[in-house]
Amino acid sequence: MGEEYRLPDAPGHYMPLREDKHLSRAYFPDNLPPTIDLGEDVTVVLARAMHALGRLDGLVSEVENPSAVFSSFVYKEAEQSSQIEGTAVTVSDIYRLEVDELDEPPESEHERDVREAKNYVRALEAALDYLDTAGRSRESLTIGLVQDLHETLMDRGRTDEEDPLPGEFRPDLVHIEETDEYGRTQVRFVPPPPSAVEGKMESLLEYVRTGRGWPDLIDVALAHYQFETIHPFKDGNGRVGRLFVVLMLLCTDLLVNPVLYPSSYFKRHRDEYTDLLLAVSEQGAWKEWLQFFLEGLRRQSEESFVRAKLLVQKRREYERRYVDEADSVRLLATEMFAEPYFTVSEAAELIGRSYQTANRAVERLVADGVVTEITGNEQNRVFRAGEVMDVVERPPSELPNPTDVIERSSSFRLYDR
């Protein structure tokens, strides 16, 4: 291996490769933190992102048992993260897989895609269990956790690799390709060779655990760039990296519950996302990257806030509608937000009632059009909470603005003494 060479202002350097004639050079990122003058532009978008995150977290935290209302947001992130990888998975697909009604041949490509998306949900659940034991703080974010995330995510999932080595750092060089306007594929970027991966990951996780005085959201953005640049696994780096963003938000107390799905923004702006990652490596474009990343978190926080508000409003509507009904009907109308696809047996478990009582409650909600049966079967029926899923799956362009869903008092005045 020859001498290193740097590009002006780049936070790393290229090294020529001799062991692979196909790949001429690999990039070695400097360890975090970089030297950055945030400036007013970044500071403004940082403040806006913090405000949006705080408003979202405040709304969710006011709801008793938030997971019973907003668990579908985890499925939303799983959907969006999977779609970035080129799949057509939907939130409904993941729920249908759970009730064995995916209507896809076993081991078909789409079934594997849906199973991979479900792996995201499993990986987050396992990480939350770990953090409940280890403590929800930066100090709990370790290399072992990252490898566990990868192992779960790659279990029977979608991969172009014969063996993606779940939970193991890559033993070989990898490269990121791009396709030009003529359809020709070429190498765009080569992450550091495998001999450097473990050391770079140890340095990254040490920074994640300790920080250097930057605001937490800045550290999240820096860590995400660094992880994707190191590219520590044979496959699945994007999925692990996006999941780690959510975990960092939780471990820095920026969120109490995992109700943000940042992959939606990255998917809509995928070219800009990948271009800016490379621009940081080759031009030191930290300000541009930070503005993009923080703006993405702001927009997704606002979108999540709107969906959360609509779900809360819909749940309150059901509470009022069924206030005088049997408690089984009243319970199912609110508890089904946690499992919007369910069988009668699952409904009975949700509300803690007998099968017969749950069946009567389900039939009442069917009669009211609140849920619909989706299989057409006489037995092993599956029901869908249509109005709940409409909120979860509605395209972002069809959602109201955040200001339109805020309930404002008609008047406010101080009383005279």
Image (cartoon, rainbow, N blue to C red):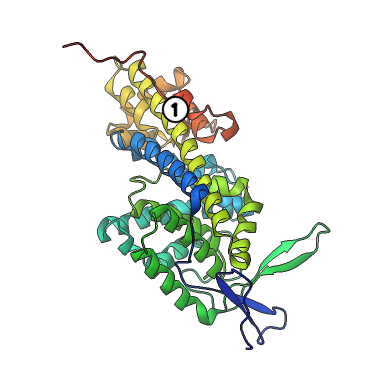
Q: Nearer the viewer, residue 1 or 316?
A: 1
* Extreme-right residue of the structure: 182
Residue in the picture at 62% in, 48% down: 269
Vertical comparison of 264 with 229: above or below: above
Percent coordinates x, y for residue 36 in the rendering: 49, 61
Q: Judging from the image, what secondary structure is the residue with disc 1 in? A: helix
Q: Nearer the viewer, residue 308 or 37?
A: 37
Is any atom of residue 101 visible in this view? no
Amino acid carrying mark 1 in the image: Leu
Quadrant in which the C terminus is drawn: top left
* Extreme-top residue of the structure: 416
Percent coordinates x, y for residue 221 in the rendering: 48, 56
Quadrant in which the N terminus is drawn: bottom right
Q: Tell me if mark 1 has few (under 14), some (14-19) or many (20+) residues whose alpha carbon lies within 10 angstroms of its own.
A: some
User: For residue 109, which quarter of the picture?
Assistant: bottom right
Task: Please give left or right for residue 414 compared with residue 322 in the image.
Answer: left
Percent coordinates x, y for residue 300 in the rendering: 50, 41
Residue in the picture at 69% in, 78% down: 23
Task: Please give left or right for residue 100 compared with residue 251 in the image.
Answer: right
Percent coordinates x, y for residue 133 in the rendering: 25, 59
Residue in the picture at 31% in, 64% down: 139
Residue in the picture at 48% in, 65% down: 35
For disc 1, the marked residue is 310
Q: Nearer the viewer, residue 360 or 83?
A: 83
Task: Please give left or right for residue 164 compared with residue 325 in the image.
Answer: right
* Extreme-left residue of the structure: 417
Is any atom of residue 74 visible in this view? yes
How many numbered marks appear?
Answer: 1
